Amino acid sequence: MSRQKTSVKVEILGESYAIRTEAAPEHTKAVAEHLDRSIRQILASGSVIEVNRAAILAALQITSELFVAREATDALTKSMQALSADVRRLLPPAKRDPGESGAGAN
């Protein structure tokens, strides 16, 4: 079941935007604040003065953070699955997952 879209007012670089989203208003505001901070940090560095270029660089930086977090999540998931398989092998047959290797089929 999808949530109903609501309009959330956010401010980025002093400009107001009405965002229609299914996400919680707090989430949308936090995302906008993160983007605003990232753009402002790039502008404050002095390496870029055009706002549109700073916004693109901020988007690239945030996307890079997302990719790194996804890779870390994937690695953690694989480690947990491997650990779970190791633990499962140590359990007595009656306690193992019934779907594993046909075990538990009666």
Image (cartoon, rainbow, N blue to C red):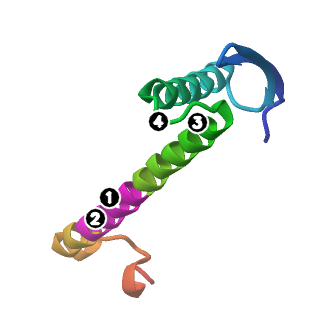
Q: Are marks 3 and 1 in contact (CB under 8 Å)?
A: no
Q: Amino acid at mark 3?
A: Ala
How far across and down, in percent of the image, does residue 37 sit?
51, 23
Residue 70: image location, x then y, percent:
45, 55
Instruction: Give the residue pinned by disc 2.
Output: 79
Secondary structure, mark 4, is loop
Amino acid type of the residue that numbered disc 2 sits on in the rendered structure: Ser
Give the residue at mark 1. Answer: 76
Above or below residue 83? Residue 69 is: above
Is 9 on the left or on the right of 91, as rendered?
right
Closer to us: mark 3 or mark 1?
A: 3
Q: Residues within 10 Å of mark 3 (few under 14, many from 20)?
A: many
Left or right position of 81 against 50: left
Residues in magenta, as a range: 71-84
Rendered position, 4 above or below 1: above
x and y percentages locating residue 19 in the rendered image: 79, 26
Label 4: how many Cα within 10 Å (few below 14, some 14–19, many 20+) = few
| Residue carrying label 3 | 54
**Marks 1 and 4, the one that precedes in the sequence:** 4
